[in-house]
Image (spheres, rainbow, N blue to C red):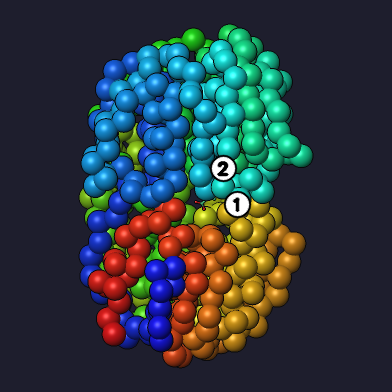
Amino acid sequence: MHQTLTERVISPARNIDGSLRLPGDKSISHRYALLGGLAEGTSRFSNFSTGADPSSSLACVEALGATVVNDGKGNVEVTGVGGTFHAPAGALDCGNSGSTMRMLAGFLAAQSGEFTLIGDESLTRRPMERVRKPLQQMGAEIDLTDGHAPMTIRGRKLHAMDYTTPVPSAQVKSAVLFAGLQAEGVTTVREAVRTRDHSELALRAFGAELTRTVDSVSITGGQKLTAIEAKVPGDMSSAAFFLCAAALFPGSNLIFDDLGLNPTRASLLDVLTALGAHIGVINLEDKASELIGTVQINAPANGLTGTTVSGGLAAQLIDELPVLAAIAPYTQNGIRIRDARELRVKESDRIALVAQNLRAMGAEVEEFEDGLDVPGGQQLHGAEIDAGGDHRIAMAFSVAALRAEGETLIRGAESAAISFPEFFDLLDGVAQR
Ligand SMILES: O=C(O)C1=C[C@@H](OP(=O)(O)O)[C@@H](O)[C@H](O)C1
Ligand SMILES: C=C(OP(=O)(O)O)C(=O)O
């Protein structure tokens, strides 16, 4: 099959075998970029994500006066502005990154001046009212167009507040915490489902104090941040593609060194174990409060069973759901996903696009407003996949293609670089053909 720069042909694999050390976690990299940009002093990060999204966060803090030195190989130095951002020369371009736009909004809400945040076509379709509302309640003035970017923020002296997030979103929680860091008084964020807590851990690493209960986090305003040195753990959401690929092939053996194992991010290991995969974790270490370790996966001899992902688990696994759905036809009993309507407002409508692409590969699938039913026991065939400009769709279907009959053409494969530019090379390295 012919491929171009934006296309990839994936041929079936016989097995998955090897060991991987993955580039740094995208979520943690964003937080280190933004907090490092505001802090006093020079932060030094190694294994920083090479994805385009964290680069958008770096570019934004640079435009706001921080100095960024990036060797493009994961070593990044950020010299922060020491508490007050400078007026940028123009609009702040968040690219494809929802994390950048929403979390940066939290920082800028308390900074004096007017800031305009823009993004690409996909980001401009994503809901931003969810950050405008709490930040406005704290005192900032924020304009959107019909709930969407461009976002214009006129920063103000903020007052603290007690906020319950209406949707499970670590980005919204983080935006309020970053605003709260600079507000007068104690800001509390409550959430029904504990979403990823990298902001809480990073704030502490940069020297801020916060208090936590099972379902809330509180921060006192007016605390200063000090630069840190940190190694970013390997990205579990990137590992997900390889974990799912390995789980499909009896006889597979894959090892991940220095993988991020933050409990709010590692539920995929439990789900794959419930499906029958054998997973071992050793060498657990606590680095800048983030857990890392070595993970080994072997597939079950008789294939994966089946499961339901719903409730809080769906929220915690939100970025891993496309790849879980993409391997579901190869399980015995299928995978049922519910309570995941947030998937519809990611870089694409991930429920619709997963269903469309599974059908293109010959699978039966039922689409629900908040999820999917993918029956098991189905053999897929190679097809043309439309990634819809969405990195996680491109990578999820590259994994499904490994067990399909015939070759699969992934259109829009370049989008993998949003979170994981190394994906296709690493896949070639571990897929035995
Ligand atoms: O906080 C983060 O780093 C992220 C939170 C999630 O988004 P939401 O906060 O919109 O759920 C996730 O989908 C995204 O990839 C990264
Ligand atoms: C949804 C994602 O990221 P963001 O919201 O930062 O664009 C993602 O990486 O899957």
Crowd rating for badge 1 (residues with CA inside 10 Å; few <14, some 14–19, many 20+): some
Whole-percent x and y of residue 116? 59, 29
Visible in this render: residue 217? no
- The quadrant in which the C terminus is found is bottom left
Looking at the rendered structure, the secondary structure element under dot 1 is: helix
Residue 349 in the image: above or below residue 1: above
Question: Camera-side residue: 105 or 151?
Answer: 151
Residue 167 in the image: above or below residue 375: above
Residue lying furthest front in this view? 89
- Picture disc at residue 167: none
Residue 326 in the image: above or below residue 259: below
Whole-percent x and y of residue 278? 35, 69
- In the rendered picture of this protein, how many numbered marks are placed on residues? 2
Callout 1 amino acid? Ser
Q: Residue at x 29, y 73 (%)?
A: 428
Direction from residue 206 to residue 170 in the image, left or right: right
Mark 1 residue's CB less than 8 Å from ligand 2: no
Residue 58 found in image quarter: top left
- Picture disc at residue 122: 1
Q: Residue at x 71, y 33 (%)?
A: 144
Whole-percent x and y of residue 347? 58, 54
Q: Residue at x 23, y 41 (%)?
A: 71
- Reading the image, the residue beneath label 2 is 119
